[in-house]
Each structure stands twice: as structure tokens, then as C-alpha cells.
Image (cartoon, helix red, strand yellow):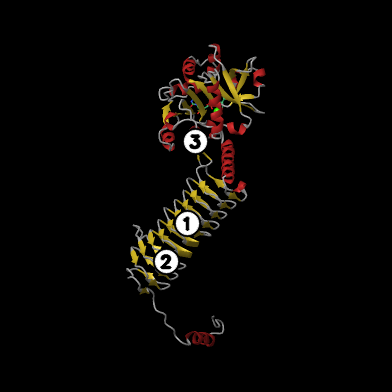
Amino acid sequence: MNENVTVVILAAGLGTRMKSNRAKVLHEAGGDTLLNQIIRAAEHVAPHERIVAVIGHQADQVRQSVPFAGVQFAEQREQKGTAHAVLCARDTASTGNGLVLILNGDGPLLRHETLSRLIALTDSDSLAGALLTTELADPAGYGRILRDEQGLVAAIIEQRAASPQQLAINEVNPGVYCFRAAPFWSALEAVQPNNPAGEYYLTDVVEILRRKGHKIASLPVPDATELLGINTRVELATADTILRARKARDLMLSGITIQNPDTVSIDVMVEVGQDSLIEANVHLRGKTRIGAGCRIGTGSVLRDCEIADNVTVLPYVVAEASRIGAHASIGPFSRLRLHAEAEEATHIGNFVELKKTRFGRGSKAQHLAYLGDATIGAGVNIGAGTITCNYDGMKKHATCIGDGVFVGSNSTLVAPLEIAEGAYVAAGSVITKPVPADALSIGRAYQVDKPGWAKRRRESATTASDKTGPRP
Ligand code: UD1
Ligand code: CA
């Protein structure tokens, strides 16, 4: 990391073509905001303290959306153009005699390797600056690159100011520049809004520096997708697809098997351990971390989950902010939410929901249960149809189940409730009082058998009326 690089990210614009109430840089691609994605590239070339985002539209929301401690903000209250935006960052960006790297807040696909190359190029020669360029079949809307006889960049001409010959140039300015601080800041101050838009154009510094005898070089980027700027929701979707494809590829290259990688959707912050297998149509969101040797079944959606090693997630599990211990088996069709915690070697089966519940080591709930606000010990068996009645219409109450408890099928556990270790709850019970350790608790009406009753009923129905006939 070059300690002398300060990064300025332009993010003050509204983004009219997004047709949104939200500032453009708050829209998400690859599982995070456009601004956070570009900060992620920038943090490879500068520490957070030397990254300055210029914000304007919805400044407070934008500030709050950035989770990286140390990142700086500068406010541009009125959008007078890109040169004016960078000037607003001048006091925040203490650049000394280092380099200033300027990025667009709406370019989430830029790779940090490309930034490093641009910095190295600017650093190497007797250059005042360097910028990325790329060739586009349709360069409409972009600033065009004008070159001198030696092939150096002479100027950038904006679409609105360009002559018909200049409009035919395919080499464009993607808006990523690196300048030597001292000459740059003085050139920036010299920029005038003498163009049809009446804006302060950052692109004018190239010509100003040239007039003072400085050299500006360029770094052509062959893969133009890296430079895609987001202006519409269509481009947002394209960027999202590209970021997720890159993520899946990175994971595969790091030793994770992904079936039908085009169908999975993995946010950029997700981590997966070696030799895990991700089946088709899996969505991994937020800060989900999956250990080594896991299998994540098709259709599962996991957000902000922590999954230890060798866990099997069967198809169609939906889980949020939950933890699953090593060697556990979850699913199919299980739901874990609000800090559910399934410890090591647990089994959670179909149509079982855990909410704010700790499920102890080796315990099992194989079918059809709701376990909410519960602390469940080790080696517990929860029968099919068990429900913790945790809500009385006003408040939530806790259920505590000790180690080795057996809860029979279709039990209703009315909280607050404690079932001490080793106890046994008979199937079909409604349990409202504490159950002592090692007791059998039966909370249901006893069965009464009336011999011959059904047969007599059928016969009396036949004689009473031919129309009604016997009922089954
Ligand atoms: C700019 C470049 C153009 C380049 C294109 C690449 C200038 C004059 N032109 O044009 O050569 O091809 O980017 O995408 O720089 N912004 C602010 N404050 C402002 C104005 C803009 O923060 O006052 C921010 C915007 O939010 C955006 C970025 O700067 O993130 C670029 O601004 P935009 O208006 O999109 O510039 P372009 O017209 O696209
Ligand atoms: Ca733009």
C-alpha cells in the first residue's frame, strides 16, 4: 500500500436517471451499496483515513451507510460540477506531496489491481498524472480522449463541447484519475465553468496541466465492463450480475464447488471454507460465513449466518442472523431467525422454526415444531408438532428445557415454563407448570373407551330413517 495516496470518491450526485427517492450511491449491487463497493476497491490502495467520499444528496443517509471506520466525508452542498466536487474534499484530504486518486461513486466494478497499476504508472515516470481509458463501440455521453503527437493525453473533451470529428473518437474517459497532489490542486483552482453546461469540469485539469508543461499518461483498460458506470436500474442489474459472477468464480478458485454457478447469488462479503459444496439456486447474503466441508442445499437462503465446519444444510432452509454448530444437519424446509443457535451435531428437520432459541448439542427436532424464546439443553428430543407458546398476546415468555428431556409429539408448552433435565412429557400434553427433573408429565384428558358404542349408533340410525342411513 502506497502511504502517499489519498482517494477522493465523487458521490454527491442524485442520479436522476435512477428515478428513485434514494441517492444513486445507496443503491445496491453484489449485496452492498455502490459506494461501499468502490470503497472496498479503494481500501487496497489507501488506508480508510485517506479515503474521502464527497457527498451531497442525502448526505446523512450516505454517511450512515458506510460501515468502514475511519473513512472521511466532505460535503458538496451544491453540485457545480466534478472539479468543484473534488475541491470540496481538499481540506479533508491532507495530501501533502503524495498522489490523489479520483474515483466515481457509481463505478462498483473497478478492480483494485487496476487502481494499483494506475498508481504505479503515475509514480514511476515524470508524470503529473495518469488516467484510465477504454474504447467503446458506443462512446455517447462520455468525455473523449484527445492525444498529442507523442501519444500522451492532450485533453478530455466532453460530449456537449465536442466537434463532430471529436465525437467519432471511441477512446473515452471513464472518470478514474491519479494526479500528483501539488500541481493538481493548483490546476483544479484554475478550472473555470466556461462550457455549455456552466459547470466546473474536472476534465479541464488535464489541459491546464499540459499548458504548464506537465505530462499526463493513460492506462488503457481492455475489459470495459470494469469501468461500467451506473446510471439506470438496467445498468445496476448488469453490475449486480457481474459482481456475483466474480464472487462465485473467486470462491470456486479458492476450493469451493458450486453447482450451476449462474443460478447462485452470493453477496461479496460472504465467506466459504474449503471443500464446501453449494448447490444450485442458493442465496448467501450479508456477512454469512460458512465453514469447511459443508453442503448447502438447493433453494436455501442464508443471511448473516455463521455456519461451522461439516454442516449439512438440506434444500430450502431459510435462516437469518443464526448460528449452526459443526456436524449439524438442518432442513429441508427449516426456518431459523433472530439469533437462533443450533449447537454441534443437532438435527433440525422439515417445517421446524427456531426463533431466538438455543438448541443444545446433539438435540433433535425432526419435524413440524415452533421453538421460540427457548433455551434447550443437550440430547433433547422434541417430538413432531411441539409448540412453545411464547406469546400471551402482550409479552414474550421464555421456555427452558434441560438436558436429556423427551417432549412427546404434539405437546403445547405454555411459557414461562421450565422442564428440568431428564423429564418426559407425554404426547399431546398441554404443559403449564414446571416439570421436575426425571418426572413424567401428562397434561391431557385421559382416554375413555365405550365398548360397542359405535356399532349401536350405526344400527339405531338405520332403523330410525331409511333416508339418513348408517354413517361411518
Ligand atoms: C464525467 C466526466 C466524463 C466521463 C464520465 C465518466 C466530467 C466533466 N466529465 O461525466 O468525461 O466520461 O464522468 O462516467 O467530469 N458529481 C458530484 N458533484 C458534482 C457533479 C458530479 O459529486 O457537482 C459526481 C456524481 O455523483 C458522479 C460523478 O461525480 O458520481 C460523475 O458525475 P457525472 O455528472 O455523472 O459526470 P458525467 O457527465 O458522467
Ligand atoms: Ca456519469
Q: Which residue is mark 2?
A: 380
User: Viewer-proximal residue, 326 or 67?
Assistant: 326
Q: Is residue 270 above or below residue 362?
A: above
Which image quarter has ligand 2?
top right
| Residue 141: percent from left, percent from top | 60, 26
- Residue 326's disc is 1
**What SS does tag 1 mark?**
loop
Circle nearer the N terminus (2, 1):
1
| Residue 439: percent from left, percent from top | 35, 73
Q: CA distance from mark 3 to mark 2?
A: 45 Å
Q: Which residue is mark 3?
A: 40
| Residue 343: percent from left, percent from top | 43, 58
**What SS does tag 3 mark?**
helix
Q: Quadrant of residue 3?
A: top left
Q: Is residue 381 above or below residue 214?
A: below
**What SS does tag 2 mark?**
loop
Name the image quarter holding the C terminus. Answer: bottom right
- Which residue is drawn at the image coordinates 53% and 11% (left, top)? 212
Circle nearer the N terminus (3, 2):
3
Q: Is residue 62 above or below residue 79?
A: below
Q: CA distance from mark 3 to mark 1?
A: 31 Å
Looking at the image, can residue 227 be seen? yes
List the single residue furthest toward the front. Answer: 124
